[in-house]
Image (cartoon, grey):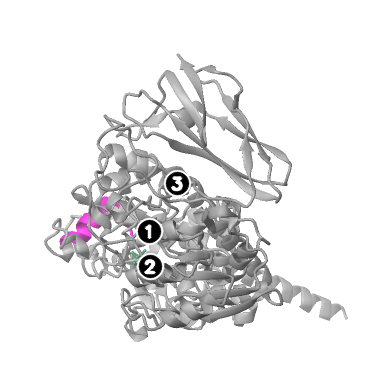
Amino acid sequence: MKNRKITFLLLLVASCSLIAQGEKDLPAYKDAKRSVEERVSDLMSRMTLEEKVMQLNQYTLGRNDNANNMADPVNDIPPAIGSLIYFSSNGDLRNRVQKRAMEETRLGIPIIFGYDVIHGYRTTYPISLAQACSWNPQLVEQACAVAAQEARMSGVDWTFSPMIDVARDARWGRVAEGYGEDPYANAVFAAASVKGYQGTDLASGKNVAACLKHYIGYGASEAGRDYVYTEISGQTLWDTYMLPYEEGVKAGAATLMSSFNDISGTPGSANHYTLTEVLKERWGHDGFVVSDWGSIEQLRPQGVAKDKKEAALKAFTAGVEMDMMNRSYDNHLGELVKEGKVSEALLNDAVKRVLRVKFRLGLFDNPYTPQTTEKERFLFPQSLKIAEQLAEESIVLLKNENNTLPLKNVSKMAVVGPMAKSQWHLLGSWRAQGNADDAVSLFAGLENEFKGKAQLSFAAGCDFDGDDKSGFDEAKKIAAQSDVVILCLGEKAQWSGENASRSTIALPQIQEDLVEELKALGKPVILLLSSGRPLELNRLDKISDAMLQVWQPGIAGGNPIAGIVAGRINPSGKLSMTFPYSTGQIPIYYNHRQSARPHQGKYQDIPSTPLYDFAHGLSYTTYTYGDLKPSTLTIKKGDKLSIEIPVTNVGGIDGLETVHWFVFDPVSTISRPVKELKHFEKQMIKKGETKVFKFDIDPLKDLGFINADGKRFLESGDYYIIVKDKKVKVTLVD
Ligand code: GLC
């Protein structure tokens, strides 16, 4: 017995010393107990120039239907590649390629897999422009958290989202991807998205690294065309475009994506001022910047690089750490370092930034995606609930003549239009792994809502465009036999998104003609409009009784939309982007500068005001706004100020109401917009109830402005705080 004990003890000591020896031999970068910075430094000390350069390249992996970015053949992918865009919908292929990186390379550095998860991964939410109309950042954060979990469990570590390009021109198809025309709104939703995607632990296996894009000013694309020049002064760069990125960086965004657009002569992907002086030196961002697809080699056609090598030099020294599908860094960066044109220090800093994000994601310790079934990772009931809630709160009641809505005493309903039974187009652009079969169509939603209450008939009437009116008669026939006509119209999903500019934001003539012909029957006409951008509706506004902007609501829009038509749901959405009277007014946005002659300079042929303003949105109830109550009317610099306003629901139905707080400074060293959104708050107000909304003002942040050097300043004088048509003057004294 004694001998056995001794043997056991000897074995124990031997195995402990082996483990200790093993741990001692374990390179620091592989030791999960070490800090990220220790592991980064240790790994850097072991890497060759070639290994460093490969970390700064991104190719693609998996089947992809997007003609804009096709995938590389798997065997062409070097195992030491830093990153891949991953198009498959499960972790299998990713794990196979990851295994080669971990086992067939000298240092076993994991690949980081990125993908465009913009408004959901498989559970597809409304497009971001619609989400902003909910004015519910908490809900958007929840949706991003679900998207992150579905993505990470499917092999994606990093999403190229949120897109936070302030919108200036609805002809530009990419307005669909951002949060509208206001800098502050884009900033709030940027922070909410980053928190949703990244959570509190990037290594949790349920979160993904975020990517603020497209840095910067892409929304200023001339005439709404894509990939073109943007005229952005230093002043406009700071007072319109920088805030969402600053707030996204403050929220901890791991990465950014440099933009295609030429920013007043220096393209976004070669712009040292934005990419290094502001992002790294002023804001201290310690993650990395990935180029947009091809945006480095595009420096050549943009006229600032003679070849790919010079493009690589310009982009890298400006501050773009990773090359997305340019084949510029892999082919030229090593050479540029050897020639002394790129310093080792700059190369090392770039590689450290990429490795830092990989360590924070836990990729060195858990490089593989656990195997799960689709049922185990997609379309959870709670996820669908969030999708339905977000769709519900994104829908905007634009018009409701004589309270046509909600429908009352309707026994026969004609549902007409090309959008009525479409599932595909409701998912919009950048749908990731969204599946149209999961979508509840507008017609299906109405069927669900009015089952046993009304008889529905359907006719497409026409296609989205073209001139075939052969379906009009059938549409007119069912309309004549019905009490009300619900027209489901709008845009195809591919009419917005990337490389999807349109010369007019009006719907195709055939859709307007269909409305005209049905209106002539004398029945109430309700329009359900699905689009990826604001539309030109001045003619339809005249002939419709009610209009609901349902955007591209994702997979769960059909039921809440029908709930609003039926009155089960009280609409609460408010526009995140102005609806122009016509395309000819563009650019038109609420936060414009004052005119030298406010009462002159108007169009001769059309109104000069929009059809529907920013923050417009009707409800089935009525809210009365009391007086603005400031805590003081005079403040000194450094003081705080708060303002309250009571809002009463005097109607017969509970409702969610968003109060938007604007600031106006009539006299400033730098001219300022006629209104600037600085705060918003959404509350449920039950019928008959009064709720107080409050704005705690930080004078420098909320009353001050920013100059062309990005310096915030606050000047004494009068300021107006504005809510709807109410305003109060507060005076700031030195
Ligand atoms: C595209 C888009 C960008 C996207 C990237 C990867 O060209 O501009 O938003 O993230 O390529 O798909």
Dot 1 alpha-carbon crowd within 10 angstroms: few under 14, some 14 to 19, many 20 or more: some
Circle nearer the N terminus (1, 2): 2
Q: Quadrant of residue 145?
A: bottom right
**Segment colored magenta:** 310-321
The verdict on residue 315 being magenta is: yes
- SS at mark 2 in the image: helix
Some atom of ligand 1 lies within 8 Å of the CB belonging to the residue at label 2: no
Mark carried by residue 539: 1
Who is closer to the viewer here, 462 or 45? 462
Going by the numbered disc 2, the residue's amino acid type is Glu
**Residue 182 x/y as whole percent:** 42, 45
Confirm or deny contact between disc 1 and disc 2 (CB under 8 A).
yes
**Residue 293 x/y as whole percent:** 30, 67
Image height of 611 relative to 515, above or below: above
Quadrant where the N terminus sits is: bottom right
Q: Residue at x 18, y 55 (%)?
A: 340
Circle nearer the N terminus (3, 2): 2
Q: Is 491 left or right of 124, judged from the image as shown? A: left
Going by the numbered disc 3, the residue's amino acid type is Phe
The verdict on residue 149 being magenta is: no
- Residue that numbered label 2 is attached to: 512
